Amino acid sequence: MLLTRDKQLRLFAAAMWALLGLCTLAACGNSTAFSKDRALPIEKGEIVATYPHDPDSFSQGLVVEGNTLYESTGLFGSSSLRVVDLETGKVQKIIRLNDQYFGEGLVKSGDRLIQITWKNREAFVFDAATLEYKSTIRYAGEGWGLAQMGKELVMSDGSSVLKVLDPETFRTIRKISVRADGRAVGDLNELEMVGDELWANVWHRDVILRIDPNTGEGLGWVDLSHLLPANRRPHREAVLNGIAYDAASGKLFVTGKNWPQLFEIRVPSLPKPVANRLEK
Ligand SMILES: [Ca+2]
């Protein structure tokens, strides 16, 4: 049976209203999922592989590219910057910071490594291939975690507010107030961009918070408390710290301060690898 033009128009209008209703419902669903009344989803990290990690490394910043791991370590008197073979955990190159410096977050930006320090207010720039020192960038406040976010950097300072920085000058471009489960989340430490999300260790908690970097809203928790049992940790400060995401392979690696192992973990929220795009 052929429909009249009038009936066709009315059917089309009814379909559009139904679609609009569905979209509205979906939008409401999204917004309430992250409201203060609803707890965020918790994913438990599944261990895919285990690698050796130097137990003398008080891990503060972790970056991975293929089989190469770049690591910043902390503590006064033993801070360092390392190039490590991922598979064997063997340190291939190391630069030791002077005793007054406490190494913190690390990014690899092109052929440069940028390592921040805790309270020294100095970021050091190194050649990524040789670890040759290039320059120092000064900044205000404490430095905890650091990650590359597009062309900019994002830095934590132990509070719930992250700073988005100009990578050349460390000038603050904007701030991100991080909230989850209806409250501000402080003690944000090591950082890593994982696809479009910013992932953050929370100091003294063996969890990662997945953050929307545009809004600061928490998207979910990754529970990693089962990775290294308490009886294998040398001291109370040997907490989870260190997230490295290899976008090309889609692999995610985590470790902790003075942990003897580094773990590749998988969770359902990990994005698909973008190998083809990055390997050009
Ligand atoms: Ca990292």
Image (cartoon, rainbow, N blue to C red):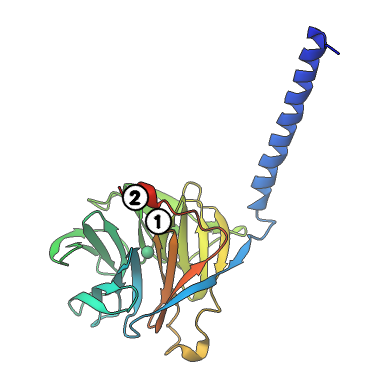
Residue at label 2?
A: 278
- Residue 159 shows up from this direction: no
Q: Where is residue 257 in the image (x, y as percent from the top left)?
A: 39, 79
Cβ of mark 1 under 8 A from ligand 1:
no
Q: Quick one: quadrant of the N terminus?
A: top right
**Residue 150 location in percent, x, y?**
35, 47
User: How many C-alpha atoms fall within 10 Å of the one at disc 2: few (<14), some, or many (≥20)?
Assistant: few
Few, some or many C-alpha atoms within 10 Å of disc 1 (few <14, some 14-19, many ≥20)? many
Q: What residue type is labelled 1?
A: Ala
User: Which disc is residue 247 wearing?
Assistant: 1
Left or right: where 158 falls relative to 140: right
Q: Quarter of the picture for ligand 1?
A: bottom left
Where disc 2 sits, the SS reads helix
Q: Would residue 13 be seen by someone viewing this image from the given angle? A: yes
Q: Which of 186/4 is in front?
A: 4
- Residue at 22% over, 50% down: 168
- Cβ–Cβ under 8 Å for marks 1 and 2: yes
Decide: is 221 above or below 163.
Answer: below
Q: Please give left or right for residue 245 compared with residue 45 in the image.
A: left
Query: Quick check: 147 above or below 78?
Result: above
Residue type, label 2: Leu
> x and y percent of residue 87 in the render?
34, 75
Which label is found at residue 113? Answer: none
* Mark positioned earlier in the residue sequence (1 or 2): 1
Q: How many numbered badges does the structure rendering display? A: 2
Q: Given the current orientation, which residue lies at the most extreme front position?
A: 1
**Element type where label 1 sits in the image:** loop
In the shown orientation, is residue 24 left or right of residue 116? Answer: right
Mark 1 → mark 2, Cα distance in angstroms: 8 Å
Location of residue 129 (image quadrant): bottom left
